[in-house]
Amino acid sequence: MSTPRSARPRPSDASPGSLEELVEAPMSLRERKKLKTRQALRREAFRLFAEQGWEATTVDQIAAAAEVSPATFFRYFPTKEDLVLTDEYDPLMAAAIRARPADEPFLTSAREVLVELVRRIAEQERTELYERMRLTASVPALRARMLDGTNQPTGMLLDLLTERAGLDAPTLELRITAAVVSATLTETSLYWADRGGRDDLADLLDRALRHLQELDRN
Amino acid sequence: MSTPRSARPRPSDASPGSLEELVEAPMSLRERKKLKTRQALRREAFRLFAEQGWEATTVDQIAAAAEVSPATFFRYFPTKEDLVLTDEYDPLMAAAIRARPADEPFLTSAREVLVELVRRIAEQERTELYERMRLTASVPALRARMLDGTNQPTGMLLDLLTERAGLDAPTLELRITAAVVSATLTETSLYWADRGGRDDLADLLDRALRHLQELDRN
DNA sequence: CATCTTTTGAGAGTTACTCTCACTTGAGAG
DNA sequence: CTCTCAAGTGAGAGTAACTCTCAAAAGATG
């Protein structure tokens, strides 16, 4: 749920937003190879994280496991953190939010979309995203980066807010709304890390966001 | 406003909470020397940051300017970030919050204390803290660390919350409250970075916190 | 003054990056 | 099918933030 806008300038453009792994589109051989490398890096990385933990796993090890040179690792992910924090759900979320009626209060939209996202994740028993959230919440370096204003979902939500309904300048209220949503997302990931269950998360999220809805001005 | 609970274990105990620089107490020669070194490191660091920027300034340079070995730098500050993020106002804030009536809604207490703190800072035309907040808000690495749950004021506030009124387990609502406060603090620092003015900050903060007060349950 | 403890400096080592340059390999043209 | 160009990769050197160890220096204490 976070597309870091990397602190440092990206070496390569590093893939548009990447529905790549989700949408089947005709790709050139080159693009397919890149995708395979990307997936291999992530797969091996998560495997090693699970085996040895975040800190004990070096970039060199990951690169070796994925059978690329260490330098290549950084061509795919600008930092070790980005390996975990860059995901492909952002564009889906953005699209889902845009699909909502424009006059609907923003937090309502956000709530619906988030709950839906959680539902889908819970459905497909894919553990990867689950593991990713667990890691994000438990590794300090990751948590820090995720929370960074530049890298967190708030940025995206803020963009959507300003884009929608022609909201002009980012006013203080606007930014607080975004911050609140971001805080809620943070809560979500913390909750996830603590309990590990995910049955009632949707409920909790639902409650929490309803809770915050009174703040909604847009 | 943040006393990082460092991700890594601190090498030395690195000074209790340090009212040291604010309170005049009889100190041994040893302690006085340590304090001097600490102050020298910070002073030279901020000077270099102002001259060359955060990234261009290396720990070695700072150590050299303060006339200690690079290794010694890390005995005083576990990371380069801590140099900026560790400050001495936390205990003051904590004391101020504790001094408030116990049955007062938490957000009211927080609001009063924060506004008071801002007022004081604005009063004394000392630019150091101001500069510190500017840095914190503008350097990605700093912003990220400051926002980290482990390092941010939320931790302290959370502790105070649980300690006060015998609030037992950290419930979701509780943590959301903390997160909201944290988000507000974030907003504050972002605002500070953008505008640079500090006349109306107290007003804005006041408004924002009043705004959030409806959420208050405790 | 002598001893004990804390603090420091020197230096070597690790890891996350960055940069450059030469090599390989897919893409597209003829 | 091949030639050319551009994109992607590997090797290797370099930097900066740390970490660790060990011995020397210096304050505290009797």
Image (cartoon, coloured by chain):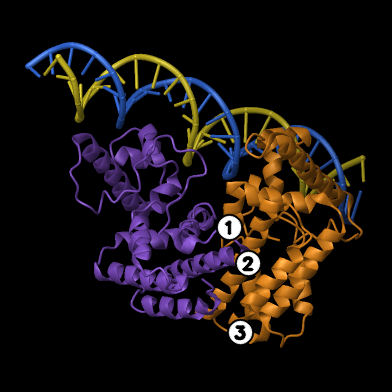
Chain colours: A purple, B orange, C yellow, D blue
Q: Which residue is mark 1?
A: A169
Task: Identify the mark nearer the N-term, 3 or 2.
Answer: 3
Is label 1 or label 3 in front? 1
Asked whether the residues under the numbered discs 1 and 3 touch, taking CB atoms below 8 Å apart as contact, a structural biologist would say: no
**Left or right: where does residue B18 sit relative to residue A15?**
right
Picture coordinates of residue A210, whole percent (x, y): 46, 80
Could you tell me the amino acid type at mark 3?
Leu
**What is the spatial separation of the Cα atoms under label 1 and label 3, in whole angstroms?**
40 Å
Tag on residue B167?
3
The residue shown at (59%, 73%) is B178
Could you tell me the amino acid type at mark 2?
Thr
Mark 1 crowd level (few <14, some 14–19, many ≥20, 10 Å Cα): few
Chain of the residue that carries numbered disc 3 in the rendered image: B
Q: Which of A190/B110 is in front?
A: B110
Q: Do discs 3 and 2 belong to a common subunit?
A: yes
Is label 3 or label 2 in front? 2
Mark 3 crowd level (few <14, some 14–19, many ≥20, 10 Å Cα): some
Q: Which of B197/B27 is in front?
A: B197
